Image (tube, helix red, strand yellow):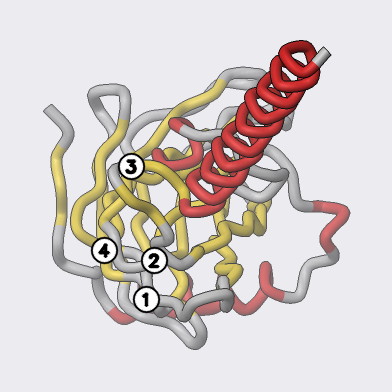
Amino acid sequence: MQRHVRRVGGPRRIGASLTLVIMVLFLPSQVFAGATVEPHYTHTKAHGSVPTSIGGMTDSYEIRVTNVRNVSMTGVIVYIPTDFELINESASEVGWIARRLPAQPGVLGGVSWNGREILPGMSATFFLSLRNPDVGLFLPAVETFLIVQTYPGGALATREPVEITYPTRLFGIDYATLAFTLVAVVFLLLLLDGIVSLKRRQKMLTAKT
């Protein structure tokens, strides 16, 4: 089973993590590649190009990391936006050791995974159970996750957005879908009523003649 380490490490490790965050925050977006963040909610319902989850709910986030370099990846760090609450973390493969990192400017903190390597061209999947921030009606929030891939002598980073929307759902169905369905039902009822009325008039005209 995966081992979890709750302590955050000594001052040297914390300082190195902070330096790494500051460096990757100012990297140009062109160098960001090789990782995705996908909430479970988006897996179960089609949305736009930005992954989507529901405000106030606890969701499972899948982080898939692909090694796009020619050397083995030695670790993965995921920095979580401040508005989330971290519940749990795990990895899809045995041998990864998870360590929670302290809060940094602009982020709740993070989780690092070490203990294995990701070979060139291969991928690994990690999971975060997070409680989403609350958002207002018609005021979705776009939160950005920072995924850092560590290599011998360097690192790559990916910024991945996730949209948090208002929980406009009833019986598991989006309000927008319910509204569209109701409009369609009303339209069909009006259409049927018009057809019935037309047939009645035709019968009345036929009877008079």
Mark 2, secondary structure of its residue:
loop
Q: Position of residue 179 (x, y in %)?
A: 54, 50
Is residue 183 shown left or right of residue 88? right
Separation (CA) of disc 2 from disc 4? 14 Å
Lower position in the chain sequence, tag 2 or tag 1: 2
Q: Which amino acid does the dot numbered 1 rest on?
A: Asp
Bin the neighbour count of mark 4 within 10 Å (Cα to Cα): few under 14, some 14-19, many 20 and up: some
Position of the C terminus by quadrant = top right
Between 150 and 170, the residue placed more toward the observer is: 170
Mark 1, secondary structure of its residue:
loop
Lower position in the chain sequence, tag 3 or tag 1: 1
Q: Are marks 2 and 4 in contact (CB under 8 Å)?
A: no
Q: Which residue is mark 4?
A: 86
Separation (CA) of disc 4 from disc 1? 15 Å
Lower position in the chain sequence, tag 3 or tag 2: 2
Mark 4 vs mark 1, foreground winner is 1
Q: Which residue is mark 1?
A: 134
Residue depicted at 55% across the width and 36% down the height: 185
Q: Are marks 2 and 1 in contact (CB under 8 Å)?
A: yes
Q: Which amino acid does the dot numbered 3 rest on?
A: Gly
Q: Which residue is mark 3?
A: 172
Name the disc covering residue 55, or none: 2
Q: Which amino acid does the dot numbered 2 rest on?
A: Gly
Q: Which amino acid does the dot numbered 4 rest on?
A: Leu
Residue depicted at 67% across the width and 68% down the height: 24
Lower position in the chain sequence, tag 2 or tag 4: 2
